[in-house]
Image (cartoon, grey):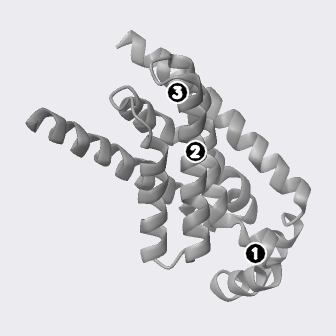
Amino acid sequence: MEKSNNNMLVILGCAILYSVTSFVCAFLGFLSPWCWIVVFPVLAAVLGAPSYLWAARRWQRFGLGTLFALVLAVILLVMDEIDFTQTLLMVVVGIASDVVRQSIGTSYKRSILLAYPVLPLGILVWLMKLWTASEWYYQGAAEEIGADYAEGLKTLSSIWVLFLVIILVLAAGSLAISFASRMGKKS
């Protein structure tokens, strides 16, 4: 039983590491609107892959993606970065990641390779108000960072940019988890 508890603590630690990594990547957003909307979620997808892979190799049951999404969502909710609706949506993305993994079978490496890219899509929930509450988003950005920054966000608020970012996050997550898996075999 003690080994099981230690394993759960390590997996929780991986979920916290994933959340911290995602949050730290968000600071790139201060550089430019492009870094906030495009670079941050793509980099978070890349840097989050090793902690997910490590935990996924140890947790064969449903719930790993949900746990990772829940930890990030709760941290962001407590910090008032997202609202309750966004929290729920982020957890739903984690559940979707678990559904993908479970539908393939957790004992197969392919399940990790296909489930992980879904998980970082939850990071886009943090940004979703750019597309769902654009004026509110621009005003907040103008107050926090400046009018020029807010104008830059307006250029990124099209549905096409959202589709582009979704594709880039999926691709980055897929490449990162594949790379992490190959590197894990060599060590």
Secondary structure state at the residue bearing disc 3: helix
Residue identifier under label 2: 119
Q: Earlier in the sequence, mark 1 or mark 2?
A: 2
Question: 184 above or below 146?
Answer: above
Name the quadrant containing residue 141: bottom right
Residue identifier under label 1: 149
Q: CA distance from mark 3 to mark 2?
A: 11 Å
Outermost residue toward the left? 2
Secondary structure state at the residue bearing disc 2: helix
Q: Earlier in the sequence, mark 3 or mark 2?
A: 3
Seen at 41% across and 18% down, the residue is 184
Question: 145 above or below 38?
Answer: below
Marker disc for residue 30: none
Question: 11 above or below 53?
Answer: below
Seen at 48% across and 49% down, the residue is 66
At label 2, the amino acid type is: Leu
Horizontal side of residue 152 vs 176, given as left or right: right
Marker disc for residue 112: 3
Seen at 35% across and 32% down, the residue is 59
Q: Nearer the viewer, residue 162 or 103?
A: 103
**Are discs 3 and 1 less than 8 Å apart at CB?**
no
Horizontal side of residue 67 vs 26, given as left or right: left
